[in-house]
Image: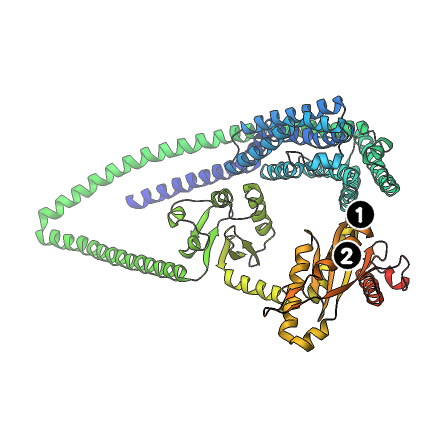
Amino acid sequence: MFGKSIKFLLLRHIGIMTTLAASLTIIMAIAVSMSGGHRETWQEYLAAREGRHASLNSVSRALGYGGLVHNLYNLALRGGDEYALATDRDIVAALSSIDQYQALHPSELERITITFLKDELTRARLSLRDLQARVKAGDDAEEILANAPFDLERIARSLASLERSATFELPSGIGSAYWAQLRDLWRMVGMDGFIHHYKKFLVTGVAEEREHATEMVVRAKTLLAQLDTVSSGGAQKEALTLIGLTLDEYLRAMDKIAELQVEGLSVREIDRRVTIDDRPALGAFSTLISSELARIENQGKQNLVSMQEMESIIIWGSVPLLAIFVFIFLSTSIFLRKMLQRSLEEVSQRRDAILADDDDIQHAVSLRKSHPLLDEFETCANYLEDVGNVLREERMMSAQQRRILDRLPNGIIAFSAGGAMAFSNARMPEIIDMPRSWFKGSKSKDELLLYLATRGDFGSGVPADLANFYIEMTDDLSVGETTSFTLDTSDDRHIRVRVEREVSNLILLSADDVTREEKSSRAKEIEARTDWLTGLPNRKAAEEAGPKMLSDAAENRQAMAVLSMDMDGFKPINDQYGHAAGDLVLRETAKRIKAELREGDYAARVGGDEFQLVLNRLDDANGAELFARRLVRVLEDPIDLGDGTMISVSASIGIACYPLHGKSLQGLVHRADEAMYGAKALVDDRVLTASNRAPHAEADETAIAS
């Protein structure tokens, strides 16, 4: 009866304490989920707002629209002291902000990117006086920028890499979508945005730069429309309208520039005629960015205050429950101590009585107490032995799997979602030519990329470029999906890499050295496009290369010539001296043709004794005609057949020039063939240029094959 009372009281108190503990746990969990996460996230944002992001935004503004990319092109075009001072001010501001960013403990990859960026900016600053002097000397703006000791494209890539590595998401409910759209809009007009491609189109006249600039303006106007639908303030809408009007002005300006380029005006004359006032748009951008940052910060601080008030309410509401819990726990402990003392006294008295009455009973009691205990010990021992057997089997299985992986012909390496190296097999160090000891211990994806990039075996040698390539390969990869690519190393090896995302979110890379297969495949491709006798490209190769050369000539606004050449009196050589002599003549002819070609020119054997040549970068048809006459004289030099026999051959050459005689490759070849047959009919000449009027003009109006 006494034992039942203790059991009842004990169960009742344990139930009450369990209920109170569960209530406290639920309350604290709610507190953590509702306030802790938001508070931590917002404090991180405020730190980023004051540090990394503030510095990065300053760098972006100093280099982008209205900054370095703007003033540097103006300096190359106009050369005024005000542009040199403005460019120097932009570079100093960017370097200062980069130093602030560097002081905030960036990652190893970020530090390398920062070093590249600072080196380029420093070279740009040191070269400003030289740029200004060359402008005053009348040098061409395109030539000035092309020969500059710095690279604007590399500055843009380094900045983009730094922005990606510092990506930070705002907490939910604090306008993150609007802020992301605003940053995207700034990128569309920033360092590598439309203003860069607009200025490059103005300086170089390359149509592709105009297309890039137009595309970015269209995307920027789409973002403006999206921002306008969610903007509430009148000042914001007015700022968006000003930016849109400025973008429209740039579109019209590009049309005007294209017209003036056709008229033949110089770059600096076009720059003087086409001017755009960017000050309203720059002011509008400043208004949008500053107002949005202020709104986000105020809203976040209000959110933080609300979370702190909620925490106070939850904490003070939990105090009474905690006090009740402590009181019941202490009272239960005291009560149990008293009950246990009384119970022990009763047990002791009964034991003494049993021992005094009968030793046999004592022996029986002892046996009844010990046997179950022995059984329990035996059961535990058997269980532990079973566990040991299972662990040994698992270790044996793991070792067996490891041996199988190490024997695979492919190199295998896996990275976790966070970038840590999960495992690699023994073949991987051999594939990428790295010591096996490097793969021991804890390594990460960034460390491996840094090692490979620093060694210069893969890609451009810039760690940021290699990291971006890895991100592009893996970010959009779904679970179970695979992709593959081939890497060409600096020691002329070819490694095929297969990338797969596993169900466990591991990124699994499998690498295989396919150098032999790649070289064999490429050799077959070259063989299929090469004339076996002369070593020159064959007709198939000429048909593939011609359209690309014609497209380049059109894009660079340069003349190009197609020459059709046929040997004179070649058949009698075969008939009199044999086909071996004819083959020797063809090989010697091809050798002399290659010796006369300039870099970038092209020659192919398209028939038995027929050759086709393409001359690039010509001023007019006269240059092609001079080349053809020189080639005829070279070909007329005697050829030794090897047995003391000397023979002479000649050739007839027809010339057709782009764009004078046609604008399609098919039309130019047709005109050159006609001129070649005309040259064969001449008595005193072996070179003839096509007439300025095409006999089949309608066939010559086809578009340039790309």
Question: Is label 2 in a helix, a strand or a loop?
Answer: helix
Residue for point 77% across, 47% down: 556
Query: In which quadrant will I find the C terminus?
Result: bottom right
Task: Examine the image and state in which quarter residue 141 appears.
Answer: top right
Q: Earlier in the sequence, mark 1 or mark 2?
A: 1
On the image, the x and y values in percent for residue 698 come to 90, 63
**Looking at the rendered structure, which numbered label has been put on residue 53?**
none
Residue for point 84% across, 35% down: 270
The reply to whether residue 215 is in sight is yes
Question: Which residue does the numbered mark 1 point to in the structure image?
Answer: 619
Q: Is residue 207 above or below residue 632?
A: above
Which mark is in front, 1 or 2?
A: 2
On the image, the x and y values in percent for residue 609 come to 71, 69
Q: Residues within 10 Å of mark 2 (few under 14, many from 20)?
A: some
Question: Which residue does the numbered mark 2 point to in the structure image?
Answer: 629
Residue type at mark 2 is Arg
Question: Is label 1 in a helix, a strand or a loop?
Answer: loop
Residue type at mark 1 is Asp
Residue for point 28% across, 38% down: 339
> In this image, 701 relative to 636: left or right?
right
Task: Examine the image and state in which quarter residue 342 appears.
Answer: top left
- State the separation of the CA atoms marked 1 and 2: 17 Å
On the image, the x and y values in percent for residue 647 come to 67, 68
The one of 67 and 457 positioned closer to us in this rendering: 457
